[in-house]
Amino acid sequence: MPDFATRRWLAETRDVFFIDRSMRSREIDRDGVCGGVCGPWVRRTAGTFLVVAVAASLPAMAATGSDPAPKATAAQGEQVGEGEWRMAAGDAANTRYSPLAEINSDNASGLKLAFSYSTGASRGHEAAPIVAGGLMYLVTPYPNVVHALDLTQPGAPIKWKFEPAPDPASQGVACCDVVNRGAAVSDGRLFFNTLDNQTIALDAASGKELWRTRLGDIRLGETMTMAPLVVGDLVLVGNSGGEMGVRGWITALKATDGSLAWRAFSTGPDSDVLIGPDFKPFYSAERGRDLGVTTWPPEAWQIGGGNVWGWISYDPGLDLVYYGTGNPGPWNPEQRPGDNKWTSGIFARRAGTGEAVWYYQWSPHDLHDYDGVNENVLLDLPIGGQTRAVLVHPDRNGYVYVLDRATGEVLSADAFVPVTTSTGVDMQSGRLKYNPSKQPRVGESLRNICPASPGAKDWQPSSWSPRTALLYIPHQNLCQDAMTYQTSYIAGTPYVGADVVMVAGPGGHRGEVSAWDPVARRKAWALTENFPVWSGTLATAGDIVFYGTMEGWFKAVDARTGALRWQYRTESGIIGQPMTYRGPDGRQYVAVLSGVGGWAGAVVAGQLDPRDGSAGLGFVNAMKDLPEHTKKGGKLYVFALP
């Protein structure tokens, strides 16, 4: 096997090849012209497994009673403005809560379609609409067109459209559909990312391009899909590509001109990770010099993943930015002995400098592609007789974590789905306690791995209501069978080393929405759905929770009981993030994008063969009937009371 430098040189001097999720090879030249389905090349034929759905029981939760009259609130200073929705999460605390209450549990049944708008794109629409200054902004999946709709005019006609023209070849290296998770508006500028690794700033009023900065290289398999977060005069963004052996990073750009303020890698020496003398992790496993090198085999950290493609939070009181890091590469854990720092964990950093303050690893030596990029919701909760500044994180490994957000101490960690891959979290060391019987070994078939690789929940974001003190978690109920094998790194191609076949979890349903009480450490209520709930949730002061289903139902349920109050069938499945705003006419509106896709919807959006259960990295096996329930599309739906 050539050394790392030689392999990278080869990648830069040849055409790029992509093995799609059905493991068929596609050849893509630098102009993005696909030569169609080519012959086998750097290919691993998917194994055939006997798929058995085995019932598993939910591990016992160490439930405790909540303190009397709990006061559970979002981090101070982080509440969303009442009328606008300027970032994908609504606020920097990632609560996705709106204080608007015109639409409530009593009248939501009267919601009517106010207007709709076709985006012209037909892959997975995961973005949240953004509203600021009387305009609504939509970012499509590739080719990442920005549409600005004029909310001051009847029917919200388009005011301007910006086409960034990303490199078509970026489609060939996108892991899990060519999605985009949204934009951010601040100080008259709109910021968004393109699939081919550009961050772009536009004048929010006119759509005029102000600057663009290229941050990554698609020839290495690197892409960008996440929604930026603006903190002061900095725009924070991260990359994707863990399944391609791309080294992860978070980058801060100056909002005024797009120049680099700082960049912190997720692997490598302390100098690259921006770890210095003020780095004080709570647990001993995170202490030591250059752990981003020494917890890997030689050179492996350079292609080790840890990408930052999920959500970023910010606490202005502590001046700390929080974000998760993605899975290590490859999926085959035997090729990367060690904890594989700093992947599948969470960093707290100084916003202005990027200096690391603490870190905690959700899944050391990640065995099942559980990543760590899910949302970190910043709350002040009554715990142990006092109000604690915490972050709440529902992880792919199956546990809802509550951490002290100043120190990184784990205060609780409780399963919210059936879990067979681990037996809990050691509260002394903070380490996940793996189940040895579910540890992958090359050539051995493992069955009943719960949760599956997309996790108990994936990127789809939760919402929080201070009125109910509940976190509304959209998630899946999936298990899998898997077999790992030795794989080799070739830049720009999949670096996985595993065959996976997913199935519905215990009970036979594939999705849920759970209302989680992080103080009592238990579910208050839960709703089951046929397919994974791949959309985000939205909570409002009207005691309503909104979410979408992959069949295309947009639903409003009572925040306290989960009772269905209203639903509307859209033309395509919903994997987007619902939001709400007050229009120029003073009325409350609720909006969501439909357009099925993403990893869960690849069988429809990517037109994969539903008979091939290994396609879509095994997700197709659990979703083979989705084409019977929905179709491709891309449309905005906006609702209001009459």
Image (cartoon, helix red, strand yellow):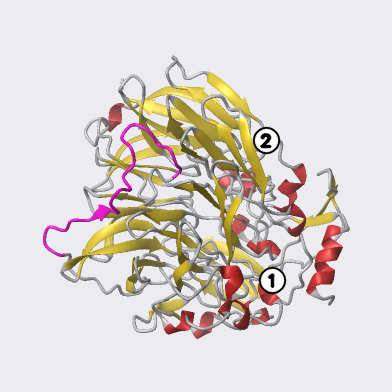
Tell me the residue that label 2 is attached to: 164
The answer to whether residue 610 of the structure is visible from this angle is yes
In this rendering, the answer to whether 73 lies above or below 450 is: above
The quarter of the image holding the N terminus is bottom right
Magenta stretch?
67-88
Crowding near the residue tagged with mark 1, few <14, some 14–19, many ≥20 C-alpha atoms within 10 Å: some
- Crowding at dot 2, Cα within 10 Å, few <14 / some 14-19 / many 20+, comes out as some
Residue projecting furthest to the top: 154
Q: Main secondary structure of the magenta part?
A: loop
Residue 422 falls in image quadrant: bottom left
Pointer 1 residue: 302
Q: Residue at horizontal 31%, vertical 24%?
A: 587
Q: How many marks?
A: 2
Which SS class for mark 2? loop
Nearer to me, 544 or 289: 289
Question: What is the spatial separation of the Cα atoms under label 1 and label 2, in whole angstroms?
Answer: 30 Å
Residue 225 percent coordinates (x, y): 59, 49
Q: Position of residue 529 (x, y in %)?
A: 42, 50
One can see residue 497 in this view: no
Q: Are marks 1 and 2 in contact (CB under 8 Å)?
A: no
